[in-house]
Amino acid sequence: MIRLTELKLSLADVPVEHRRAADAPTETEADRAPPPHPIAVLTRLAAELLGIAPEAIARLQVFKRSFDARKAALLAVYIVDLELTDPAAETALLARHAGRPHVGPTPDMGWTPPCAAPASLPHRPVVVGFGPCGIFAALTLAQMGFKPIVLERGRPVRQRTKDTWGLWRKRVLLPESNVQFGEGGAGLFSDGKLYSQIKDPRFLGRKVMREFVDAGAPIEILYEAHPHIGTFKLVKVVEHMREEIVRLGGEIRFEQHVSDVHIVDGALRGLTVRDLASGQAQELRTDHAVLALGHSARDTFAALHARGVDIEAKPFSVGFRVEHPQGVIDRARWGRHAGHPLLGAAEYRLVHHASNGRAVYSFCMCPGGTVVAATSEPERVVTNGMSQYSRNERNANAGIVVGIDPERDFPGGPLAGIALQRALESHAYVLGGGNYNAPGQLVGDFVAGRASTALGEVEPSYKPGVTLGELDTALPAYAIEAMREAFPAFGKKIVGFDRFDAVLTGVETRTSSPIRLPRGEDLQSTNVRGLYPAGEGAGYAGGILSAGVDGIRVAEALARQMAAA
């Protein structure tokens, strides 16, 4: 097959899909049918580019579609794969166009298991955590026949969703079932973004996408440049993936908290697992465990540190959530095309290098979404962003955060970043009124250095609620200084970004894990054989897609080691 990486069409040539507004967790077969693409127009353009007749193309399929808004005439940009009616002619055609930047062979993006489980195993592998990384680690192990045991401290996804609404609506926090803990992980209550800038030479991200689609995700995530699923749809997708793991011989155990690891002569020999329903602890014998803990498993990090497992502090970021009317972002991004049904809610990415040496940037931008309460510990306030598939809420939100690092900002050992996070979250709880309200401030007042007393046109979406005041003490002084400088600069890039009544909500502290669990080339812990740190909590991913890819890689490494042994 031949891949063409830049075919451009005007919006008028692109059919409009009918499913963009659908948030329903399930769809009919008609809803899941491939969306219409302008195949005839693309075939004609491809033939012109290659210097062949359109009839010479037997089949053309869309691999990716994006939009180019850099000029007044907004364009759709396609990457396509095609087959010729005479397959033997493809080699000659590729040779004729060798060196052209947008013509080449279609890469092999299929996944092949590196090994299969032996007929018998002394102990089953264990996956700790059932967020994106743990799901794909368990699924990959199950597909290779290793029948993993999954230990998840939280609850199944539907009960977990109800528990999370308990905090948002009734101010009742369950420390083991919330935005951070439970089936689906922290990625469940997010925008469901499925794109990443990781290097992926084996196209494992494509496997992640296909598994999601096979489990019920919208089929268009396979071709959209910035695909996302949204929470409502992720619920059913996660359930289907759990069912597939079980069908292949895996076992999922909920409300099981790993409180200790057993290490003998530098090798893993088991886990202490506490059943949260009964409070009883038991020993689970295993020589191989994937640690897909997520970035908020602070007690487990402490237990690993106490046992001497190698842990190091790593940089992360802290800041606030900012909300604007989505229309402001749409007009700035799409211009006169804002509101076009193909485009949906616009996104943005911003960065400013402040005069005090700090980098301020947008993080986890959620178009047409809401700001959510994301704490997992009592009497602390944490914010995050979430969107549904339709992205049709009134506000856009994003984290506006400042990068910090261990050496200058939180020296004191591997767990010092966790201590800083907790201090900021506890203070935010006090600033918000001690009832899980979040402290807030209008952007105009924040830049001017005065307290806010009343909202403008922008209504904050955070639940349980926002307590207006002053955010100067919510973050370290260097972060406040850098952010005050950044907002006027961002306003020059996106008209209206620094509008007076845009709302800041604090604090955003769980941008990434504050620790890393070092691992070797075989992906095992550098000082504990059989322990495989993985995903965002271990410091090796930053989002659903990269966490899923890391889960696959770690599962393959574990499987090869078990098969060889």
Image (cartoon, rainbow, N blue to C red):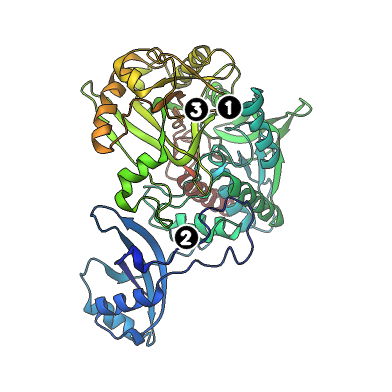
Which kind of residue does numbered mark 1 sit on?
Answer: Thr
- Residue at 30% x, 49% y is 335
Front label number (3 vs 2): 3
- Name the residue beneath numbered marker 2: 222
Dot 1: element = helix
Q: Position of residue 402 (x, y in %)?
A: 34, 26
Is 84 situated above or below 257? Answer: below
Seen from the viewer's position, the closer of residues 99 and 379 is 379
Please tell me the numbered disc located at residue 300.
1
How crowded pointer 1 is (Cα within 10 Å; few <14, some 14-19, many 20+) is rated as some
Which kind of residue does numbered mark 3 sit on?
Answer: Thr
Task: State the residue lying farthest toward the right.
Answer: 278
Tell me, yes or no, whether the two marked residues, 1 and 3, touch with CB atoms within 8 Å: no
Please tell me the numbered disc located at residue 106.
none
Q: Position of residue 328 (x, y in %)?
A: 36, 39
Is 415 situated above or below 228? Answer: above
Which kind of residue does numbered mark 2 sit on?
Answer: Leu
Is 484 situated above or below 21? Answer: above
Quote the CA–CA distance across marks 1 and 3. 22 Å
- Horizontal side, residue 38 vs residue 449: left or right: right
- Name the residue beneath numbered marker 3: 383
Q: Quadrant of residue 203?
A: bottom left
Q: Tag 3 or tag 1, which sits nearer the N-term?
A: 1
Q: Position of residue 75 (x, y in %)?
A: 30, 60
How crowded pointer 3 is (Cα within 10 Å; few <14, some 14-19, many 20+) is rated as many
Q: Quadrant of the N terminus?
A: bottom left
Dot 3: element = strand
- Horizontal side, residue 151 vs residue 219: left or right: right
Quote the CA–CA distance across marks 1 and 2. 36 Å
Q: Tag 2 or tag 1, which sits nearer the N-term?
A: 2
- Horizontal side, residue 493 vs residue 341: left or right: left
